[in-house]
Amino acid sequence: MIGTLHGVFLAYLALLLAWNALASAPAQCAGRPWERVLLLPLQAALTAVLVHDALGSGPPLLARTGIAALFPLAFALGLAQNVHVLAARGPRLSDIPFVLANAGLLLCTTLGAANIAGVGLPARAVALLHDHSILQHLLGSPLAHLATLSWHLPMLVRRRDAASIPGALAGLFMASLAGFVVALLVVMHDTAEEIVLRFEIEPHAAAPRADLATGVLAGSPRAATAPGARDGPELALAPPGTLDARVVPADLAAPLSARDGRPLLLELRAPDSWRWGLPDGPEVTAAFLDGAARLAAAEHPAVLLPFPEPDAAATLVLGGLQPAAWRSLYEQAAARVHAASPGTRLAVRLNGTGVRSRALFLALAASPSPVEVAGPRLLPGNAEARGPSAADTALDAWAAWREELSEPPELWILAAGLSPLAYGEHAQARFAEGCLARGNARPDVRAILFEGWTDAGHTLGLLRADGVPRAAGRRLLQLLPAAPR
């Protein structure tokens, strides 16, 4: 899955390192330029940080304040190299995009590092964070603020002229890439600011109504995972809510620990070993079906999501299956799960609201349905979707879909949240409260789950990497019932 998820991101990093090594070659053989002694080793180390985070092997290093601060330092040194070379050999028109790109990304990464450290930022600064996240989406990973932090590295200008046509074309390509970075940061800033400001009008929430179940998705504690798995630190601060909601790998063998008596919701994800390559199709299906049956027998969860989202994450491991094929898979899962745990209800979460997502829902929900719980993931949209108001659009779509059925599955909001590193901590808190208000206001919504408790392997955490609650975490700790001690 690494190539599918992060192929563009990894290729971009490799290209950047190769270019910087060539660009820093001395104009004359009179010694090593200072950037080869200082900046290139720093860039190599920061590349290792980004690759580590992209592979998901443990809590993201970039979430640590000290490591995040090294990125603006690298951009400051990159900008210093640009100025130094221009002063030594004279400026050229093709140098301008490099200087502007490094200056813009220096500002973005400085704000990003401050945000990671918990510094409150004004709306205009947060807009630049979101502006940067759009760039990460295009030049890094499509899941930049869902699965990894695809920050970038500075671009160096050449110390000597190209000696060949391929070398000249390479210089033109890199200048064009730098120009694209600058243009995107400038062009998208107003749009990003419009989206960020919309979080200010999110509805405020009171405590959940009595019949609304609540929970926060969290990885299983490290002590309870299979050997070698890294689902995150075991924290003293338990996620609030009336549900114990956990995301676990499909190959989890050991029983869950630290059960606190709340009804258990389990969501299966792809095993960690699949990062390096997927098994054959039948083995992928068998892993999820076997995992669902095994965990149902061992844990007797109240609700079980046996597969990732059929219209999103599941396509990475199972491909773009047709609705009829998904219906068959859920029927097999229901038979095996109910044989092991008759009281467990199967659930499905869908990411989108388009034609394909609707067809999937109708196929899975048609009576007699193998799923008893179904619902959306709520995320902010783009400016056209009015940012956080995209959550209302999604719930309206689900209401329309359910009207097409005589006996629809129970409606749950099965994930709600956003990356504070792409929108800011204040926006994360306002969106979480807004989604809770939406669930309170719609009697057909029977439960809401928030994404996610820790920053282990993603950037959506309600807690920072050190276990300190972000603004959204503090607000949900106030609003949701406390976990039993």
Image (cartoon, rainbow, N blue to C red):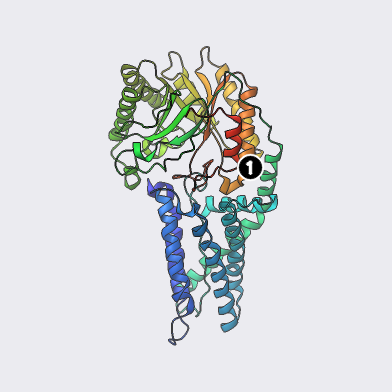
216 in relation to 229, above or below: above
Residue picked out by circle 1: 427
The residue shown at (56%, 56%) is 113
341 in relation to 389, above or below: above
462 in relation to 362, above or below: below
Q: Residue furthest front?
A: 485
Residue 313 locus on image (x, y percent)? 44, 37
Residue 166 locus on image (x, y percent)? 44, 72
Residue 462 locus on image (x, y percent)? 54, 40
Q: Residues within 10 Å of mark 1 (few under 14, many from 20)?
A: many
Query: Who is closer to the viewer here, 100 or 105?
Result: 105
The residue type indicated by label 1 comes to Ala
The residue shown at (44%, 72%) is 21
Horizontal relation, residue 256 to residue 184: left or right: left
364 in relation to 465, above or below: above
The residue shown at (57%, 29%) is 480
Horizontal relation, residue 194 to residue 336: left or right: right
> Does any portion of residue 141 appear in the rendered image?
yes
Image quadrant holding the N terminus, namely: top left
Query: Who is closer to the viewer here, 145 or 19?
Result: 145
Q: Residue furthest top?
A: 406
Quarter assignment of residue 46:
bottom left
Query: Who is closer to the viewer here, 372 or 214?
Result: 214
Residue 200 locus on image (x, y percent)? 70, 40
Q: How many marks?
A: 1
> Does any portion of residue 188 appear in the rendered image?
no
* Mark 1 element type: helix
